[in-house]
Amino acid sequence: MRHVETLAPTARPATHRLITGSGLGRFERRQPGAGPVGDLHPADRLVVWHGDRRSAFSFGDEAREPVIHILPGEAFSDLAACTDDEVTYAYIDHRVIAAVAADMAYGDPNRVDIACGAVEDAVLLALLVNIDLRLEGQGAASADHVIAENLLKAVASHLVARYSAAILRKDRRRNRAEVKDEAFTRAVEFMVDHLDQTIRVEDVAGVSRVSPSRLVSIFEAMVGETPYSYVIRLRLEKAKRLLAMTSEPILQIALDCGFSHQEHLTRHFRKRCATTPAAYRQRQRRMLTGSDH
């Protein structure tokens, strides 16, 4: 974890939301000045991301991950009142945190405290980005909502593992849901750390402590796609940030994101984004500068 100074937010053009079936978790793009989400508890956690899968940071030699703010739940009212921009947030009820802590850690799960602050966390960002992608548009399918709920629980698990002082269990007497969440988080961490390298499913399965076939099943249940497809998604999201935030040649960006050559990046970019990297960069720069030309 690396704590950083708070950076300015960017405006969001649209709003969508997810409220879990239990009502104990929310993911939402919210208008400035909107009222609180309901009963607020200081042990709840509000994970705020001022991002739209690109960055508001000026062009420079080095791209940075967008800053994510981890706040106590009761801070939501102040956040809604003080910001002039839409924000994207995940609101995690303290009962969800306690439930995952009971599976993951020793001691009283109700006493697990998630540290607050402004952080750069590539794994947490990847989870938030993928929830955002699943909910984008008014026609999000019910399957996408189920996947988003799974990812929201994974956010809670990641907060306990990374930002609490809880002593995590190391024995194997755990339920299947806990094993699945832990394997998924380990896999995403490995993928994010090795995007510029060749990533084999056998290697990801090894660090996730499950078999390759089990890993494929976990990813299909959590995010509705194979580990390979998820790696391509992460690589494209990294490429988008580099295209928007830096002046690096597209060939170098392709290599930094783990694509074998520029055409390899362009082929996947066309398939998933319906545009080319060059056209995407031009559009993002026009948006940042407010120019129509």
Image (cartoon, helix red, strand yellow):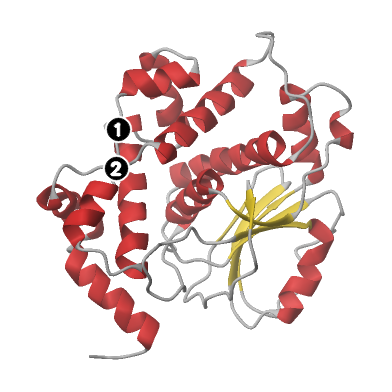
Name the quadrant containing residue 163. top right
Name the quadrant containing residue 21. top right
Q: At x 18% / y 51%, what residue is drawn?
A: 265
Please state, as top left, top right, bottom left or bottom right, where the C terminus lies in the image. bottom left
Asked if the residue at tag 2 contacts the one at tag 1, i.e. Cβ–Cβ closer than 8 Å, the answer is yes
Percent position of residue 20, x then y: 64, 46
The amino acid type of the residue labelled 2 equals Ile
Location of mark 1 (residue): 228
The amino acid type of the residue labelled 1 equals Tyr
Q: Is any atom of residue 275 visible in this view?
A: no
Label 2 crowding class (10 Å Cα cut-off): few <14, some 14-19, many 20+? some
Q: At x 25% / y 59%, what residue is drawn?
A: 273
Q: Give the Cα separation between the discs numbered 1 and 2.
A: 6 Å
For the residue pair 202 and 229, the one nearer the viewer reads as 202
Q: In the image, is 224 to the left or to the right of 116? A: left
Residue 273 vs 58, above or below: the answer is above
Location of mark 2 (residue): 232
